[in-house]
């Protein structure tokens, strides 16, 4: 599904290398988790994959189902099936959450040559999915993420994911800022989307989310590289011992 | 000798070919205004009040040519039930207008209203004159002295529909001087809509006297004609518990200077003024607002938004003056511009001058580009770059457009802005 080879990324305006040869393969139907110390490059990886400006790929490739992602505009990557749940969702004053969602859903459908969703159908679907995530009608009406609490913003990201039904979902610390109940809701939202044809890359610092969303593979990222890959037990090891042992092991 | 002196005097030059009526009910006001104009002279580049806007094309004797733009859009307010009053190149067009009759108001044409006992005597040039202090507004004085047409509306009740002043620009060289007077009696209500480009060059004054408990609502769209020039003045005086609301949409026009001079003279009055303007290329738009609080517990609110691209220039000069004794004043002012490229410019001079101690006044002015994080967020969800830019641009303007209370009017204005942005895709 998602295939990243020797990805090297530096900042566009600065001589600062952030990703130093990332190799990662997420298969369809699988959930991969990435853990790693602060500043190791996890968010940068997710931004570069989704096409944010300010970064320069100096080497390597990233493909989604065999299609080169790095050459595409962000909106084309989205239409191709890539989704990023932001670590820090952006507030957009003046743009209604509903309008935004419907524009996004229909823009993707249009880009793929599919029929657009009618206003009525959209409303029905969004209401049902919002209800599952305990997002109330008022939040749907408000401008995008404006005045949302940290946890509400994260739930709103999952609502967008549920509406857009992407093939490859990247979740960047979607668990941070969530209370225990909200974490369950979000995990349920993610689990409901788990399917044969869909891949997940879940960036997190904590084992707790992975209790709910059981990963198939866990990677440890440090200093711009994947330094260790293992099964779910790797996350438990990090939870218990931190990164010191793993870092020492590869050094 | 005398002739040579005349030629070099800009006031004399612009007065040439214009008549200062010496008879009729407005004669005294006109000669008074002429004296004001002669005392102040015409605005010049070096005047502090014209620091950001060059007045020369507004003050030169001959109006610069402005090509009439073919417009395939249906006029604004077309679907509404309203009383239509049409001016073509600054001349009232009886044929195209409705009968000037509506329950609750009386309407007369300035050019033919010649009764000696005219109510407008207490308004015509009166509010304009009050507005000359502390800053002189020579173009308004010129207007009072030489206006050739306009409309006089006396509102005694609550008319069932709005009055729509519709302007048509048909001649490349038209130079219009229009003067409207509106007087709302106590408790009366009126909505005035204005739309269309009035002339190649327009000098327009609207004076609005709002008595106690009356309410005036004003929505204007200044016609999307690329080359037109306009200097407009809106003078309003508010009585106790009265309300004034004004919204202006400006799309294109090579030069627009909109001055508003609002005096809150009765307690508990409310004045809201807002503007949304979009400019592309050779476009200069200036909002100059002066609000005076001279009574207790009044509220004033200014919301101005400008979207500028391809070297367009936006200006905002806004002042709130709170006089001694105007306690419990609530004054708010915001002016913002969205610069869609590095060539465009926004020049702002917000001012507060306060002589009372129990007031809450705030002002803010910002100028910036599209928020890159918001743009990326929208694009990452699949919204194409151009759509995302338009969404953010419209949402920026929305704050000003939302000042319009009536849903249908608000939607119409937003549609126009959407259309304007749509035509600039590519
Ligand atoms: N635009 C930028 N300008 C300057 N430095 C940047 C920029 N983007 C990333 N960095 C730097 O790159 C490094 C990696 O940052 P990144 O946000 O990817 O880390 P992370 O692994 O997501 O960390 P965290 O766990 O704290 O979220 C950090 O040192 C960060 O300061
Ligand atoms: Mg991060």
Image (tube, grey):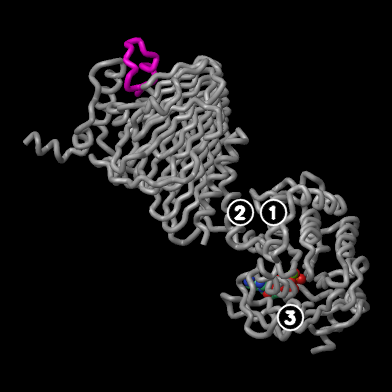
Q: Point out the stretch of residues depicted in magenta.
A: B110-125
**Contact flag, marks 1 and 2 (Cβ < 8 Å):** yes
Residue B277 place in picture, x, y as percent: 48, 46
C-alpha span from label 1 to label 2: 9 Å
Q: Which residue is mark 1?
A: A100
Q: Chain of mark 2?
A: B
**Pointer 2 residue:** B391
- Return the x and y of residue B264 as percentages of the image width and height: 49, 26
Q: Quadrant of the N terminus of chain B?
A: top left
Q: Is any atom of residue A115 visible in this view? A: yes
Ligand 1 - quadrant of the structure image: bottom right
Secondary structure state at the residue bearing disc 3? loop
Q: Is residue A115 above or below residue B41?
A: below
Give the residue pinned by disc 3. A66
Q: Is residue B238 above or below residue A48?
A: above
Q: Secondary structure at mark 2?
A: helix
Dot in front, 3 or 2: 3
């Amino acid at each position: 599904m998602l295939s990243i080879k020797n990805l090297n990324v530096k900042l566009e305006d600065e001589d600062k290398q952030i990703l130093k040869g990332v190799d990662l393969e997420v298969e369809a139907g699988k959930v991969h988790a990435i853990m790693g110390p602060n500043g190791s490059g996890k968010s940068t990886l997710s931004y570069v994959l989704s096409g944010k400006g300010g970064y320069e790929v100096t080497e390597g490739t990233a493909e989604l189902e065999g299609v080169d992602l790095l050459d595409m505009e962000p909106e084309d990557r989205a239409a191709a099936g890539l989704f990023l749940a932001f670590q820090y969702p952006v507030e957009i004053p003046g743009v209604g959450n509903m309008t935004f969602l419907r524009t996004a859903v229909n823009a993707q459908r249009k880009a793929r040559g599919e029929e657009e969703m009618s206003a009525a159908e959209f409303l029905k679907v969004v209401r049902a999915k919002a209800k599952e995530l305990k997002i109330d009608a008022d939040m749907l009406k408000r401008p995008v993420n404006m005045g949302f609490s940290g946890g509400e913003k994260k739930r709103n990201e999952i609502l967008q994911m549920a509406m857009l039904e992407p093939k490859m979902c990247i979740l960047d610390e979607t668990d941070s800022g969530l209370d225990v109940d909200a974490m369950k809701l979000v995990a349920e939202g993610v689990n409901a989307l788990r399917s044969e044809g869909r891949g997940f890359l879940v960036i997190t610092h904590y084992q707790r989310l992975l209790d709910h969303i059981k990963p198939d593979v866990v990677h440890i990222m440090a200093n711009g590289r994947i330094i260790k890959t293992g099964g779910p037990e790797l996350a438990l090891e990090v939870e218990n011992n931190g990164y010191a042992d793993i870092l020492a092991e590869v050094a | 000798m005398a002739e040579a002196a005349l030629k070099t005097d800009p006031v004399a030059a612009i007065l040439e070919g214009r008549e200062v009526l010496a008879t009729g009910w407005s004669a005294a006001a006109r000669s008074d205004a002429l004296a004001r104009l002669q005392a102040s002279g015409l605005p010049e580049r070096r005047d502090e009040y014209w620091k950001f806007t060059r007045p020369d094309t507004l003050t030169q004797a001959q109006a610069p040519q402005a090509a009439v733009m073919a417009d395939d859009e249906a006029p604004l307010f077309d679907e509404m039930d309203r009383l239509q009053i049409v001016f073509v190149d600054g001349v009232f067009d009886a044929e195209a207008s409705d009968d000037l009759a509506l329950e609750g108001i009386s309407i007369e044409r300035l050019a033919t209203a010649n009764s000696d006992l005219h109510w407008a005597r207490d308004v015509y040039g009166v509010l304009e004159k009050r507005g000359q202090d502390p800053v002189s507004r020579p173009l308004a004085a010129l207007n009072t002295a030489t206006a050739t047409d306009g409309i006089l509306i006396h509102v005694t009740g609550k008319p069932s529909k709005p009055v729509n002043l519709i302007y048509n620009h048909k001649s490349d060289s038209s130079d219009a001087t229009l003067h409207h007077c509106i007087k709302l009696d106590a408790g009366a209500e009126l909505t005035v809509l204005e739309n269309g480009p009035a002339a190649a060059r327009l000098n327009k004054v609207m004076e609005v006297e709002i008595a106690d408990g009356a309410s005036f609502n004003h929505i204007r769209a200044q016609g999307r004609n690329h080359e037109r020039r306009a200097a407009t003045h809106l003078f309003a005086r508010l009585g106790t518990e009265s309300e004034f609301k004004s919204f202006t949409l400006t799309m294109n026009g090579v030069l627009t200077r909109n001055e508003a001079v609002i005096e809150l003279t009765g307690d508990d009055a409310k004045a809201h003024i807002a503007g949304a303007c979009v400019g592309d290329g050779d476009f200069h738009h200036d909002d100059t607002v002066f609000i005076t609080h001279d009574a207790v517990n009044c509220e004033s609110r200014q919301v101005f938004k400008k979207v500028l691209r391809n070297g367009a220039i936006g200006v905002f000069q806004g002042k709130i003056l709170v006089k001694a004794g105007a306690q419990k004043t609530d004054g708010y002012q915001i002016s913002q511009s969205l610069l869609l490229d590095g060539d465009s410019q926004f020049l702002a001079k917000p001012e507060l001058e306060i002589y009372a101690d129990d007031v809450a006044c705030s002002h803010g002015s910002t100028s910036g580009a599209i928020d890159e994080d918001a743009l990326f967020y929208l694009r990452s969800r699949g919204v194409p770059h151009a759509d995302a830019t338009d969404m953010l641009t419209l949402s920026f303007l929305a704050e000003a457009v939302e000042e319009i209370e009536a849903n249908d009017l608000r939607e119409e204005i937003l549609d126009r802005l959407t259309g304007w942005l749509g035509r600039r895709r590519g």
